[in-house]
Amino acid sequence: MLSLRRMRPFVALVALAAALTLATAADARIGGGSSFGSRGSRSFSTPPPTSTAPSAKPLERSMAQPSRPSSTSSSGFFGRPGFFGSGLFGGLLGGFLGAGLFGLLFGHGLFGGMLGFTSIFGLLLQLLLIYIVARLIWGWWQRRHAPAYAGAPMYRDNVSSAGFGGAFAGFGGSHAGADSGTPIHLQQQDYDTFERLLGEVQAAHGAEDLNALRARMTPEMVSYAADDLAKNASRGVVNRISNVRLLQGDLSEAWREGSVEYATVAMRFSAIDKLVDRNSGQVVEGDPVHPVEATELWTFRRDHGGTWLVSAIQQT
């Protein structure tokens, strides 16, 4: 009897821990709370902050490749141009002059050490090279002493804001930043599409409907979603998402690269997010009653005039 009394606090603690675990957010929505996808040339740059999402985590999974400077330099040895310029001509000219100076030092004339004979051709070649060297030295001296012109105009990126025009469909004000590409303006129907895709993508993921995801996401994003669904299947669980509701949203940036348009939108939304056992239907993780909130940045892309597709999801 005494042992049972001593065990009661421990049993209560275990029950409380189990209840807290059950009430903890499953974080099993699409992506599992990770950052993945591609944002065109801005895949490795941080989206501009918004009131909904002041910060964003970098992409953890992406098929985009960061731009790297070329390792091959055309500016000469060790990446610096030689005195006679870079490339084949500079190397040959330096070699001719070096051989001529070597011949002078040993009393063979400017090109005696290299040509080994005196001829009109050799004399003309010497005069031509001397003329070229003189021109190069004169050009170098002029560039060295050229005055710096003041008052030249400074050009900045023409960044325009694409505001949401007040609160509509859960979205608030916004500002669009652009370091590369051309800023674009979005319309009311674009924001309506973003909100609709938020719910449809989450529902398709919960239903494990890859065909529905293919119609709403880029092939890259579908591949990540399929991988997550396969992991859930191996664990014997399925993610059930329902009652998705947008609470607040604003635009981070919208731009065009060639014929492709991008828009990154910060969205705070609520949803019933839970993992259930495939066989019994019992809740394994998450709260089956109370919705949880999440804030993410979704990037959408489309060919000019085409259909918006989800191309990246980033956590805050």
Image (cartoon, rainbow, N blue to C red):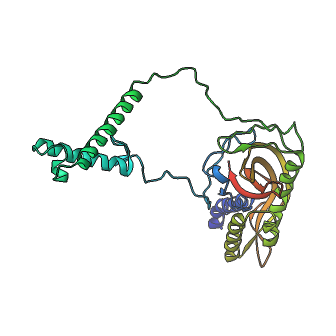
Q: Residue at x 80, y 54 (%)?
A: 304
Residue 263 visible to the viewer = yes
Left or right of residue 121: residue 35: right
Residue 80, above or below 305? above
What residue appears at the point 73 percent right and 73 percent down from the top-left corner? 237
Point 85% across, 49% down: residue: 190
Quadrant of res 3: bottom right
Residue 11 rendering spot, x and y as whole percentages: 67, 63
Q: Quadrant of residue 289?
A: bottom right
User: Measured along the vertical axis of the image, is residue 312 above or below residue 253?
Assistant: below
Position of residue 140 measured from the top left corner of the image (x, y, whole percent): 37, 32
How many badges with numbers are in the image?
0
Please identify the residue farthest to the front as the structure is shown: 120
Decide which of 289, 6 is in the foreground and name it: 289
Residue under the point 12% across and 46% down: 108
Can residue 208 be seen here? The reply is: no
> Image quadrant for the N terminus?
bottom right
The residue lying toward the viewer, choosing from 179 and 14, is 179
- Locate residue 7, reporting x and y percent: 64, 64
Farthest residue to the bottom: give it.
279
Q: Quick check: 103 left or right of 65?
A: left
Figure check: 150 above or below 36: above
